[in-house]
Image (cartoon, grey):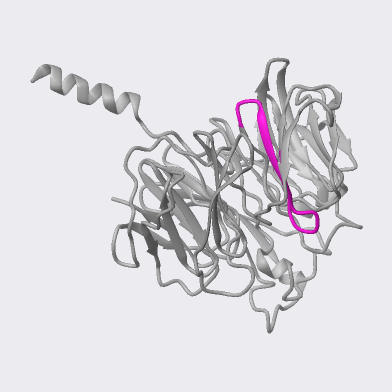
Amino acid sequence: MYRTAAFAVLSVVLFAAADWPRFRGEDGSGVAKDQSLPTTWSATENIAWKVDLPGFGSSSPVTLGDKIFLSCYTGYGLDADAPGQQETLRVHALCLNRKNGETIWQRTVEPKLPETEYDAGRISLHGYASSTPVVDDEAVYFFFGKSGVQKYSLDGELQWTASVGMGIDSHNWGSGASLLLHGDLVIVNASCESKSIRALNKADGEEVWRVDEIVDSWATPLIVETAAGKELVIAERFRILGIDPDSGKTLWFYKKPSDYICPSTFANGDVVYLINSRFQAKIFAIRAGGRGDIADSNVLWSKKWTTRVCTPVYHDGHIYAIDQLGVAYCLKADSGEEVYGRRLNIDGGGDKIYASMVAGDGKLYGVTRLDGTVVMPLSPEFKELARNHLGDDTIFNATPAIDDNQLLIRSDKALYCIGE
């Protein structure tokens, strides 16, 4: 009996769920270590708690210990028929109790104007709080586009605000990329704000390095480990870049077909995958660690294919995704060969899914914009295990967080904690 009890305690230690501190989880892969996750739920089944949010937003929740962090906006752009006046726009940084969703603190920011006009067009698809915050054991960082990056203590005390540009000539889709931490740096893809990617000092928000000519990129970059050291990989309209994350020096580049970029970088070891979003729809597999122009040395394969907005999941030699039109795919990661492509008949118009897939407990979760989460096996054999609805009549754009054997799913209206 003692041995049984000891094994149970050891199992809890070994398989304890990790925090979800950034967009797509601890390592940016979208894959969680949790061992028991729900397959089915509804508005009344498998809901641990639900809390109404003070405003709209498509930023994803992140977690650290007993806290959840996310952002939202109020006052302007809440109604396509009557968007209101920009002067009423406010953005909010939120900290919620992980156990019950109650608000621990809320900080309201008066944004820098003019903002991107709400025109019931592309900005209306995701709003003014689209960047997922990032948290470590000392502070939490929020990115509000033209209104800059803000650092708060975990107790909600504002530490600093840093501007990364006002987007004078930027695209009218607004901001979207999420923050990344590296050592003492906060890394910001400020393509929409200043056509740059920047590293800010975590202590004071001062710029440490900057790379310009980052054009039409809504993608969150990724740091990967290579034989030559760590590299920051990001794609923009014309190039894919490998950057020294400590100095900002460009180590390698690949001149790709011109197209804007929404899906974030994802990887398997030192092999990185990047996706053109539309006109030159393509996925590229590149081995990081090269130097200079790597077109003839480190490009492993490419093929015509895109998810448009969503970032896929890599697992065990395969790439999984649901694209914007609601088609579920599995590709072989070493060649791009399609294993399956199945239309899921998701309700809605042309833009059916913006959230990126996440995985855990042998299952894939794909959240659609009109309140339906598709659950599939994390396997190259296609099967739809469940399609779950919460009865929420607002929009679901945020990528779920997985934490402590539960899913955190966010709509414009509410945050749901799903699981026992």
Estimate the x, y position of residue 8 in percent, counting from the top left.
Answer: 21, 26
Is residue 261 placed above or below 42 in the rendered structure? Answer: above
Residue sitting at the far left:
1
406 left or right of 267 in image = left
Residue displayed at 59% across by 44% down: 23
Q: In which quarter of the image is residue 84?
A: bottom right
266 left or right of 293 in image = left
Residue displayed at 69% across by 70% down: 124
Residue 282 is inside the magenta segment: yes
Question: In the rendered picture of this protein, how many numbered marks are placed on residues?
Answer: 0
Asked if one can make out residue 175 in the rendered structure from this viewpoint, the answer is: yes
212 left or right of 282 in image = right
Asked if one can make out residue 201 in the rendered structure from this viewpoint, the answer is: no
Q: Nearer the viewer, residue 20 or 158?
A: 20
Residue displayed at 76% across by 38% down: 234
Q: Which quarter of the image is occupied by the N terminus?
A: top left
Q: Nearer the viewer, residue 222 or 111?
A: 222
Estimate the x, y position of residue 247 in percent, counting from the top left.
Answer: 82, 23
Q: Quadrant of residue 212?
A: top right
Q: Which of 315 and 409 is in front in this view?
A: 315
Is residue 185 placed above or below 219 in the rendered structure? Answer: above
Q: Which of 78 and 241 is in front in this view?
A: 241
Estimate the x, y position of residue 279 in percent, counting from the top left.
Answer: 80, 58
Residue displayed at 26% across by 21% down: 10
Residue 99 is inside the magenta segment: no
Q: Give the range drawn in magenta.
A: 268-284
Estimate the x, y position of residue 21 in percent, counting from the top left.
Answer: 54, 38
Q: In which quarter of the image is residue 301?
A: top right
Is residue 283 placed above or below 345 in the rendered structure? Answer: above
